[in-house]
Amino acid sequence: MIEYYDISGCYILRPWTMAVWEMMQTFFDAEIKKMKIKNCYFPLFVSPAVLQKEKDHIEGFAPEVAWVTKSGQSDLEVPIAIRPTSETVMYPYYSKWIRGHRDLPLRLNQWCNVVRWEFSHPTPFIRSREFLWQEGHTAFATKEEADKEVLDILELYRRIYEEYLAIPVIKGKKSELEKFAGGFYTTSVEAFIPNTGRGIQGATSHCLGQNFAKMFDITFENEKGEKAMVWQNSWAYSTRTIGVMVMVHGDDKGLVMPPKVASVQIIVVPVPFKDADTQAIFDACDATVNTLNEAGFRAEADLRDNYSPGWKYSHWEMKGVPLRIEIGPKDLANKQVRAVRRDNSAKIDIPMVNLVEQVKDMLDNIQQNLFDVAKHKRDACVKTVRTWDEFIEALGQKKMILAPWCDEMEVEKDVKARTKGETGAAKTLCAPFDQPDLEGVNCFVTGRPGKKWSYWGRSY
Ligand SMILES: O=C1CCCN[C@@H]1CCCn1cnc2ccccc2c1=O
């Protein structure tokens, strides 16, 4: 997937990873184009004056901003920041381009890299100093339009996780403490890693309200000839998605790639025998690959003569190829192939005449099974609690905790302080849109009437 790089927190994304990124990008890019969102590209560099424009947006993040201070031997007059996100890069131009209501909605997206010079221990995909993402930045005349788009984009993020990466996620709203400080409200899709008992934010879709319109003077003349501020959203998913996929589906044999995003969906391995017709077997492998590729699958044959079939089985299992097809003399004689699933190791013999539709069924079944298994494991990690003691017990059991609380920032800060430990504090992950009943339910911390049910847990 990656190669480590000689700068800490930076990783080389190798083709096996890049193919997954491109598969997701193909889906998401097509979907936002259906929504009339257009791609653009803004510069990597941000001038300090503009970056400081929004102090409370930037203050918490300032230590993460990377700066260019020299070119060659000479110092730059003024240091230049490398974008950690592009609000301050783009919005001065939104202000210039948006004059009247006919200029709205303005809906732009860019596929790019961003740099955040984080100091907590770097982790491939999950926490890197440079990563790839898409960032959407939209402006509307009304709050209603913005509110609707926030949820439309969040649904696309759910589809990326559940339909492509086979990972169950929870849609919800971030708490006041966890939301993007520069915004109005933040929605997210939240995943959970059963093996470590930690939640992970999968993607975010923010409504920025009119906060940035105020800061960057992004106004328009509405139909009544009045000057009004725009309502804005910004939304992103990143290469972090791939790290979640590795952690959720990986097993002791290595990666397990969901078929929808697998660079190679089927690997065909010849099983030659000493007195068998090796050339006939190799020809059958090539024919099988061609048939499958012509049917729209991503199949390859491993015809290397310096590795044994057994070695090849382990190699491609470690790389997570969803389906292996073995062809030996017996298979040839019976005009069949042996198919082996990566997700549950099931082996079945397929008549060559049924190859395409049976492979399609198996890949669809693998995709669904990966999701079902991940959902079952995630659901087994969820615990609903009503009291502090139950909360602490569930936290110790590495659960994702659904608890009613009074939704006050001070209370969340208090929970963080009281659960701080070497494996990190508990925090809210999101308040699920799908809220259980709050009738007669009290806050698990303060005992005051419960205002909201939220998922809590340790997180990445
Ligand atoms: O999430 C998104 C979605 C895409 C567009 N940006 C928003 C909000 C980014 C919040 N953020 C996150 N890290 C930062 C790091 C340094 C400077 C600024 C920031 C910063 O504004």
Image: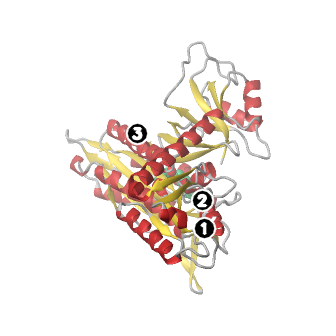
**Left or right side of 179 for 122:** right
**Viewport quadrant of the N terminus:** bottom right
Label 1: how many residues lie within 10 Å, few (<14), some (14-19) or many (20+)? some
Q: Is residue 350 above or below residue 264?
A: above
Question: Can residue 87 be seen by looking at this rendering?
Answer: no
CA separation, marks 3 and 2? 25 Å
Q: Is residue 79 above or below residue 443?
A: below
Percent x, y of residue 391: 72, 28
For the residues bearing labels 1 and 2, Cβ distance under 8 angstroms: yes
- Which residue: 59% across, 64% down? 316
- Which residue: 55% across, 32% down? 431
Percent x, y of residue 452: 56, 25
Read off the residue under disc 2.
125
Percent x, y of residue 180: 53, 45
Percent x, y of residue 151: 40, 39
Read off the residue under disc 3.
151
- In the drawing, what numbered circle is on residue 2? 1
For the residues bearing labels 3 and 1, Cβ distance under 8 angstroms: no
Label 3: state its secondary structure: helix
**Left or right side of 373 for 217:** left
Label 2: how many residues lie within 10 Å, few (<14), some (14-19) or many (20+)? many
- Nearest the camera: 456 or 52? 456
Q: Disc 1 marks which amino acid? A: Ile
* Badge 3 or badge 1: first in the primary sequence: 1
* Badge 3 or badge 2: first in the primary sequence: 2
Q: Disc 2 marks which amino acid? A: Phe
- Nearest the camera: 46 or 348? 348
Image quadrant assignment for residue 131: bottom right
Q: Disc 3 marks which amino acid? A: Leu
CA separation, marks 1 and 2? 9 Å
Q: Is residue 235 above or below residue 406?
A: below
CA separation, marks 3 and 1? 33 Å
